Image (cartoon, rainbow, N blue to C red):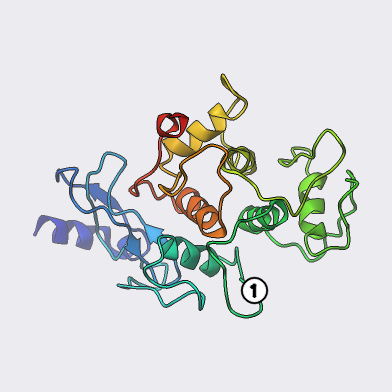
Amino acid sequence: MRNYLLAVTIGAFATVLALPISLGIAKNELCEPYKCADGMRVGRCDANGTVIEYLVDPCNQHGGQVDTLPMSFVDVSSTHPNADAIAFVKSQGIVSGYADGTFRPDQYINRAELLKILVLSIQTSNPDFHCTFKTHFSDVDEQAWYGEYLCKVLWDPDAWVEGYPDGTFRPTAPINFVEAAKILDRALDFTGTEGKTWYEGYARQLANRNAIPLSIKRFDQSITRGEMAEMIYRLRANIQSQPSRTFEELSV
């Protein structure tokens, strides 16, 4: 009755804002995020594992709640460990998959693919913007499919990608976890810095946000397209209730 009266008092504002009220429920309560029809996830618990009560449907601005999302790609089943993440990045227009309707979640992602995904994740399209390369790499075809994305990044004074000392970019080279951690940190304006190793601060940033999937077991492990979707999903949708590797676990 108390919550009902509060909802009535708030009136019209409650139909727009999902105001959270923390309930003193044990941390072991199920904290799986709410699934929304457009692929967004809304946290069910706060960072301490306390369940949040919402005055209105937490997905009211995202098409309502759903029990399960439709299959996002023909090769991504509902039981795939990264299924929710892949559905999210597709719904946000961050990925579109291949022409045959597949996403190939278990295929290693290369530097050019990661570049495109991050540009689509953080930048708004501007049809009037025509990019001119400020930086050139000896192994980059500026007319290739990834050329416009690389150009947009390099145009930024705070460009968050770098080449190698030999003047190459190596667009088709697989990218490993710590390389991706650094790029994610810089692209999303986190505050990671180099520690005892060049990658420590960046890896810790992801660990602190519960954004390292359990399938990642080594710092130098090449990451898959599904794992990259998982990290972006957790960072963009602020999903902190999923199990994550710690920096210390990867250090073993």
Q: Position of residue 18 (x, y in %)?
A: 33, 58
Where is mark 1, residue-wise?
A: 98
Labels in figure, total: 1
Q: Residue 185: image x %, image y %? A: 59, 39
**Where, by quadrant of the figure, is residue 116 drawn?**
bottom right
Question: Considering only vertical position in the picture, is 36 above or below 175?
Answer: below
Amino acid bearing label 1: Tyr
Q: Is residue 103 left or right of residue 147?
A: left
Q: Residue at x 32, y 57 (%)?
A: 33
- Element at badge 1? loop
Q: Where does residue 26 sit, x and y in percent of width and height?
A: 14, 43
Please say whether residue 177 is visible from this viewpoint: yes
Q: Which residue reaches farthest top?
A: 196
The residue depicted at 39 percent of the width and 73 percent of the height is 69
Task: Tell whether 154 sits left or right of 175.
Answer: right
Q: Quadrant of residue 160?
A: top right
Residue 191 in view in this figure: no
